[in-house]
Image (spheres, rainbow, N blue to C red):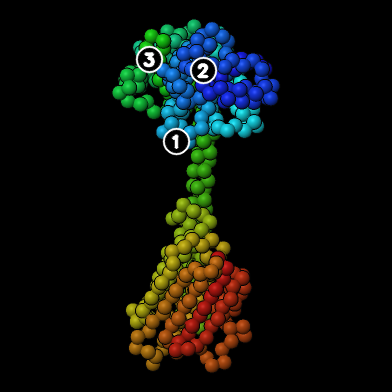
Amino acid sequence: MHDPNILIVEDNAIAQLTFVQYLRDLGYHNVLVVNNGLEAIEAVRNSEIGLAFLDIRIRGSMSGLETAKHIKDITPSLPFIFLTASTDQRTVQQALDCEPYSILNKPYDLATLQGTIEGAINYRHCQEEANVLNSQFMLNQILDTTAVGVYITNNEGNFVKVNKAYCAIYGYSKPELIGQPFTLVLPKSIHKYAQTLHQEHLTGESEETNGEWQTIDKRGNRKDVFIQVGRIVGDNGQRFKLATVSDITERKDDVRKLTQALDEKDSYAQEVHHRVKNNMNIVSGLLYLQAEKVKDRSFVYNLFQESMTRIKTLSLIQEQLHRSDNFTFINLKDYVQSLVFNVQTSFREQTEKIRIKQEVTIKPLDVDRAIACGLIINEVITNSFKYAFPPSSTDSPQINIQAYFQKNHIHIVIIDNGVGLPDQFNLNNSTTLGFQLISSLTRQLSGAIDVNSQDGTHVYLKFPQ
């Protein structure tokens, strides 16, 4: 309808002439002008009107708002547009309650007017096309072309309509389903529960929730489906349940297989960590047995003890991973506590004398850096236990350990109040294996370390987070 019959309901003569001219300038010539609501209703009844413009405040026994309501009762699909010079919010809200296509404020802008008219004509055209779809034949075609299963059940819970997709999910034909209870595709154990839920949903006693259900197809195979439900009302007031059904069996099977594979992977990973830890304990045990042979040679014996402590440091990583759900990160606080306990166990005689204070931020650390960091901490604490507190040293030996995160860096601070390092000590020139390990591991961490003596030994390690 390129040039529809346009009705103008306006009681001001000049406003009538002006608006008619606007429409003619825009190419619309089939225009009918009336002065009041009664004439407007008569025009709608007797003429094929495609679009109506109504002044909200027309004079006479019927206002523009009342006229719009009567026109809507006669032709519900007729788009109408209110004309107003008022910006009163109460009036605007009353106009919106009539559900107009639009409201135009005076004076009119031609571009806005043209866009509004074209939009209203398209709206009317689409409304007429939608009315064609209301036929039973068209509705059946719509249902059968959708890829989602759809069914409608009556108050008794029997199928009254199913589409092709629903039949395909369960392997039934339409005649096999129509008239049958919807519980046909459910396990017998939940028939009574499902029927009760259905009745409560239709009567409004409860809202049946959307969700996943396990159902059964014609051959008895399990079908995992996701169902969305709603209520619809027929012309006679009878209530029906409308449900859409999506087959998620393959997706659920994939999730089950993936979950099983992940569980198996976790089991394998736990077994690997367990075996690695056991092997480390075996190596540590062999070193212990070997050390017993040279117990009378203190220097050699101490070398074996240091090696066992380092192996135990590595073993602690495996132990934390074995207890954790995460195989790539460990908790730094728990790890440091374990390292300290390990060193204390190795130096039982000094343990009761030396007080250790720990302030460690709880933060996950990846395994590679945790190993390097742990070995450094182990070497520093071991040195403190071995050399910082000879019999003639302080009466209150103490080691303070701090680990915290700041400015994208991890900071490790270890301070003891012992006798300190030799005057000429230089970490980079040290020939002992322990300090060589500390230098090498610091470079591995891309970090920096400072070791100095000031009222004891102070070690500051910093590396990127």
Q: Secondary structure at mark 3?
A: strand
Regarding residue 53, the answer to whether it shows in the image is no
**Disc sitting over residue 410 in the figure:** none
> Residue 456 sits in which quadrant?
bottom left
Q: Earlier in the sequence, mark 2 or mark 3?
A: 2
Q: Earlier in the sequence, mark 2 or mark 1?
A: 2
Task: Measure the C-alpha gap from mark 2 to mark 1.
Answer: 23 Å
> Which residue is pictured at 43% across the width and 87% down the height?
418
Name the spot of residue 109 as percent of width and height, x first. Answer: 62, 33
> Residue 229 sits in which quadrant?
top left
Name the spot of residue 213 as percent of width and height, x first. Answer: 43, 26
> Which residue is pictured at 32% across the width and 22% down the height?
204
> Which residue is pictured at 38% across the width and 82% down the height?
398
**Disc sitting over residue 239 in the figure:** 3
Q: Residue furthest toward the left?
A: 205
Q: Residue furthest toward the front?
A: 13
Name the spot of residue 425 as percent of width and height, x first. Answer: 56, 89
Comparing marks 2 and 1, which lies closer to the viewer?
2
* Marks 2 and 1 close (CB-CB < 8 Å): no
Location of mark 1 (residue): 88
> Residue 154 sits in which quadrant?
top left
Q: Residues within 10 Å of mark 3 (few under 14, many from 20)?
A: some
Q: Residues within 10 Å of mark 1 (few under 14, many from 20)?
A: few
Q: Earlier in the sequence, mark 3 or mark 1?
A: 1
Comparing marks 2 and 3, which lies closer to the viewer?
2
Q: Secondary structure at mark 2?
A: loop
Task: Measure the C-alpha gap from mark 3 to mark 1.
Answer: 43 Å
Regarding residue 267, the answer to whether it shows in the image is yes
Between residue 465 and residue 292, name the one nearer to us: 465
**Disc sitting over residue 35 in the figure:** 2
